[in-house]
Image: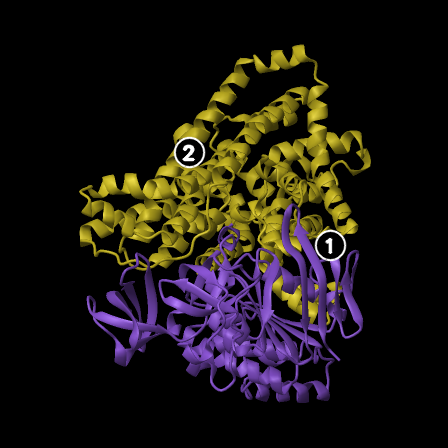
Amino acid sequence: MTTLTLSNISLSYGSRQALRDVSLVVPSGSLVAILGPSGCGKTSLLMALAGLVSIDSGTITVGSRELSSAGHRVPPEQRGIGWVPQEASLFPHLSVGDNIGFSLPKGRRRTERVEELASLIGLQGFTDRAPGQLSGGQAQRVALARALAPAPDVLLLDEPFGALDSVLRHSLGRDVARILREQETTAIMVTHDREEALDLADFVAVMDNGRIVQVGTPLEIYESPATPWVASFVGDTVELEGTWKDDALNCQQCGAKDFCGPAENRLGCTGHVLCALGDVAATSQGAEPTSGDTVRVVVRPEWLVPSPSGISAKVRGVSYAGHDALVEFELTGHPERVRARIAAPFLPSVGQDFHLALRHPALVFPVEHHEGALA
Amino acid sequence: MPTTTASEHTPAPVAGVSRVGRPPAWLTTLAVLAVATVAIPLVYLGVRASEVPLSEVMVILSRPLVGELLLNTMGLSIAVSATAIAMGTVIATIVTRLRIGAARTWLLISALPLAVPSYLASYGWLVVVPSLNGFWPSWALLSAVTIPYVTLPVAAVLRGTSADGEAVARTLGLRPTQAFWRVTWPQVRPAAIAGGLLVFLYTLSDFGLVAMLRFQTLTWGVQQAYAASFDRSQAAVLALLLVVIAVIVVAAERGARGSLTRTTAIHSTKEPLSPVVRVFFTVVVALPPVVGVLIPLVGLAGRLAEATTLRSLNPQQLVQATTTTIGVSVAAAVVALLLALPLAALAARYTNRWIPTLEGAGYLSNGLPGIVVGLSLVFFSLSVLPALYQTVVVLVFAYAVLFMPKALGTARASIEGVSVDLINVARTLGASRFQAWWRVTVPLALPGIGIGALLVAITTMKELPATLLLRPIGSSTLATELWSRTAAGEFGAAAPYAAVLVLVAAIPAMILSGVRSVAKEEL
């Protein structure tokens, strides 16, 4: 049992509070991504987990063993928590093999384990090299093998692919996630790259300003964000103003019917919202509004699709990205503009008339959330 | 030594974490002890000087000789610093911005005068032109020897700054000289002025060169007051006057270098030069090494080759002076390193309100003239430990006090250079605090710390004024032998000592300073 449990952790450096009442459970063997903007406290969280800093309150436990609490901290070398730092940080005076075997007692067993780990990361035959002779991706793999060598209960990865170019980053990320799953290692990966988090992790915890704002599967985080801030942090958004209506749902008439498939109301629609996109099915996030309330409506650009029977709009701008494009529309009869992600074969040109339909329930937030998220 | 300022204001979680921790008590205690040890003699000089009645101080200060010494000292220091700032900036610009060929080699060559003790340069010139004396030769030779203090930092800044700014200024209608003044000079000014203040300190502290060229400055005055009479009060007051000037200059230097920033090398294209212009610029760059290194060495070699020199040589005495020199230098390096290490570890790994102050106190003796430290230890040992007066113990201690800052600077930088991430990784891999230190910090920092110790040893070999005051009766070092023979006009007899000094001190220093400046460029 290597479930990692964080209960109500707080941490501050002098007057600056880095972590505020953070609670999180990482199930044994799973990979959790901590996603947040820089300075949100995610690195502080890793330092606290690794036992490199003390926490002011709360507890950190692995299985049934308490590692940190206020006034008590098991030193880093006795915690069984491995760490892959941001920039590999290989020991420059040791060979690749000695880096991997740093934590192991010298002897034949160590040589075997080093060889085994080197082949796990696909670098067999590299053990005699100096760290300086490795590419960025290779160095990062060695850092991973080095951290895995003592078979830690939990592994921490601090923006492990941050220094790499985007192609290498993608393939290495997949490799690392695969290795971690094969080894059944409980792991926490810190990142500010939303695609990396959504692609690799079993669960994503979104952090902002020292707090965990939302925890969920990548799908939950993306499709049911807890706040408009989370919605815009994990993906592109279109925001509109609307009026909430408690009308009974009519799934048969809904524009997103195909998306829900045979399981009716798969996305948990709770009502309708009247906005520039028409009268559309919606899920209210957080407190349920009362009918007639002004609400904040959030949809994702790819939820808007070309549809001859949809609402009419005029193309005002195209931001081309090859495989698709973000197209800016002016909706007929409304001052608001919306952006839709239109796949390449259907791209309109600027000034053209177009018809759009929403193929997903809109997300509805209370209006006051707006100020809170910006502050 | 540029200081980073940005990270100290807002402790970023990554870089800040390990520095927020509380330093272990034993480390703090050792560091405080080291600083106290270094500060004691200097404090004692103040005590000794304050014992002189104020009326006597006024009498001493109003002596015409003292006024003349002060005027000479300030005049020479200002003239040499101004020359070094102008020439150093010009040379650095030529080497980094113009296509004169073999730029890196020229940079190394222009650093060479750093390795030559000033009195060796004046000795070499006196061999060639025995009639040299007074202000102008002192000015010319000191300038040649000290120009690298400006050239190297300015070149480092220039290599890290894009030349595009000047190019842009040209496209906006400025002439080349205007573009330099309005775009490049503001960027290099902090480095040039900080270097210039170091030159000022060097000139202020210099004793051997001005004494050989019979130009009377304050350091000469201190030595005369101490050696020629028993007027210890006059020596103490003059020494204190030197301290006051040095402290003002050090404070100014701190202020100036605070604005230096770390830079990285940027490659920019250089325009080809016409052959005539190229030769002219090459001559300008070559001038200080030729005056400060080449001509003195040629003079020395010429005198060494003469038959009379060899006949007058006393091999036993030469061997004795050499072994004494090396012995005290190695001892000084060890003591200086022992004093510096706790303070370096403390300053590199922790920060709180008073650690910077403590570290600053460690650099206290950096700007002090050797003769002042020598004199203060004379007073200190005479009244506190009379049994040790004029023993090798006090001499080694004086060296350690004088040169500890050199070991401190390199040791601190070496320890700081070992990333905290590496230590943290080692901890998460099961290494205890001590194991992490032993398996990661020590192997990585050792080369740098070793170079620091070597620098202390080499600098000690060249030290003259403190050695003259403190050496045990009957024993001598290469520097004192060279000095006393030159002072007596025996240029030939001095030659073998000068040659050995070049061999044991100047050449390793050249190699080291070469290695170091190249290493700095590469980083």
Q: Which residue is mark 2?
A: B80
Counting every numbered tag in the picture gives 2
Viewer-closest of A74 and B85: A74
Vertical comparison of B366 with A140: above or below:
above
Q: Colour of chain B?
A: yellow
Q: Residue furthest front?
A: A248
* The one of B156 and A332 positioned closer to us in this rendering: A332
Look at label 2 and name its amino acid. Answer: Val
Q: Is residue A112 left or right of residue B2?
A: right
Secondary structure state at the residue bearing disc 1: loop
10 Å neighbourhood of mark 1: few (<14), some, or many (≥20)?
some
Specify the quadrant of the image occupied by residue B476: top right
Image quarter for residue B268? bottom left
Q: Residue at x 20, y 41 (%)?
A: B174
The letter of the purple chain is A
- Whether B49 is drawn above or below B209: the answer is above
SS of the residue under disc 2: helix
Amino acid, disc 1: Asp
Q: Is residue A353 left or right of residue A102?
A: left
Checking the image for residue A56, the label placed there is 1
From the top left corner, tell me how far across and down residue A103 is, in percent.
70, 76
Q: Residue at x 42, y 56 (%)?
A: B264
**C-alpha distance separating marks 2 and 1:** 58 Å
Horizontal and vertical percent position of residue A140? 54, 75
- The chain carrying label 2 is B
Give the chain letter at badge 1: A
Q: Nearer the viewer, mark 2 or mark 1?
A: 1
